[in-house]
Amino acid sequence: NVLPIQYETFARDVKAGDLILADDGKVSLNVIESNGDDLVKLEVVYGDSIGSKKGVNLPYTDISLPSLTPKDIADLEFGLTQNIDWLALSFVRTAEELRELKHRIRQQGHDTRIIAKVEKPEALKNIDEIIAEADGVMVARGDLGVEIPLEEVPIWQKRIIRKCNIAAKPVIVATQMMESMMDSRRPTRAEANDVANAVTDGADAVMLSGETSVGKYPVETVKSMERIISIVEEMADIFYKNLEADKSSPTYNHDATIVAGCQLAEHTGATSVVGMTASGYTAFQLAKCRPRARIFIFTHNRAMLNVLNLIWGVRAYFYDNNESTDKTIDDTTEILKLKRHLKRNDVVVHCASMPLHKRQRTNMIKVTKVE
């Protein structure tokens, strides 16, 4: 009759009448009383058993637990020693929590990118500031669907994706996308529709969790999801979005050049758009435009290669010759020909910077035909 919880101030934070949900809302409990120290008496409203390591949500309680717990900090320090590319922060409530995490990462000499997991009502109130501060966003529908009314989740999913697309920030849709395939070899029609909707909404990635970690058919699940994504990308109107640069942005000239490059790709029927980047900025901006042409990014920064795998449509390759812009264009074209991404008479739009050795943001476009 007694359940332990890894939340030291739990008894102080809750009060009589508070609602508590466990295991993604499968079990609902009401607080009867709390001694304010180490014991809370609960009444089960619905649900039966609770397994170990299940999540607990307090949708209407102001919790004092920090976004970064001592365990999170220990995990962070270990992850940084492994040179992780992306780090997801759970239960983000404010942009300040992301700034604190960035500060800790920079203090240890790393530049690991941060994904903000949106799963709290407070995060929705601060969503614009969170998107601005984060390097990427995850719509974590499991906890979000427990913390807010379930019927609001699809609307927030679309809003967050749209905001991230405009901000050129990668966005991931997660939780229960192929849930039935934990026990079945085929997804339901509703699940196929859910994945398709995330793709057409503009998600950079869709994520599996229980389906591949503890499900019976992990490989079949991945294959099914890949088929759905591929067909939707062939049939749906998902290309050439966000073809407008923000005139108030200090990077407007560079952004407008990239937009123009994507428009050229559309008008010339280019098969590929090729860019150079050190920080990843050009790749993010090209992906924002959602060109039908394939996006190939070359970088001298090896750490950036894995980072860019998350970005919509981007394939990244290493290249570190800074002799001249023309030579770079010739070299990268040859590399893509050798990898069979380009063939004779293909039209290619190159987005680059001049002079090349200064490694500035994109300020020129060149259209070529492969010989």
Image (cartoon, helix red, strand yellow):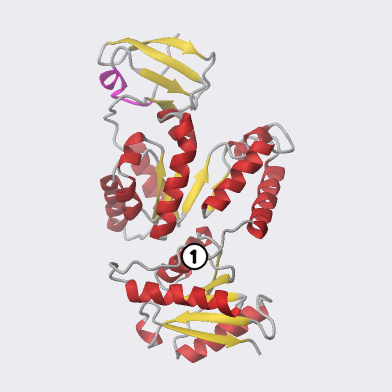
Magenta stretch: residue 331 in it? no
Can you see residue 192?
yes
Mark 1 Cα-neighbour bin, 10 Å: few <14, some 14–19, many ≥20: many
Q: Residue beneath label 1, please?
A: 287
Q: Amino acid at mark 1?
A: Ala
Residue 227's place in the image compared with 245, above or below, is above
Q: Which residues are magenta?
A: 6-14
On the picture, is 238 further left or further right than 7?
A: right
- Residue 356 in the image, given as x and y percentages of width and height: 40, 86
Left or right of 107? Residue 120 is right
The location of residue 264, given as percent across then percent down, is 52, 78
Relative to 313, is 194 above or below? Answer: above
Give x and y (percent) for residue 330.
Answer: 56, 88
Farthest right residue? 185
Residue 232: horizontal and vertical position, in percent? Answer: 65, 54
Please state which of residues 291 and 34 is positioned toward the viewer in this rendering: 291
Residue 110 quadrant: bottom left
Image quadrant holding the C terminus, namely: bottom right
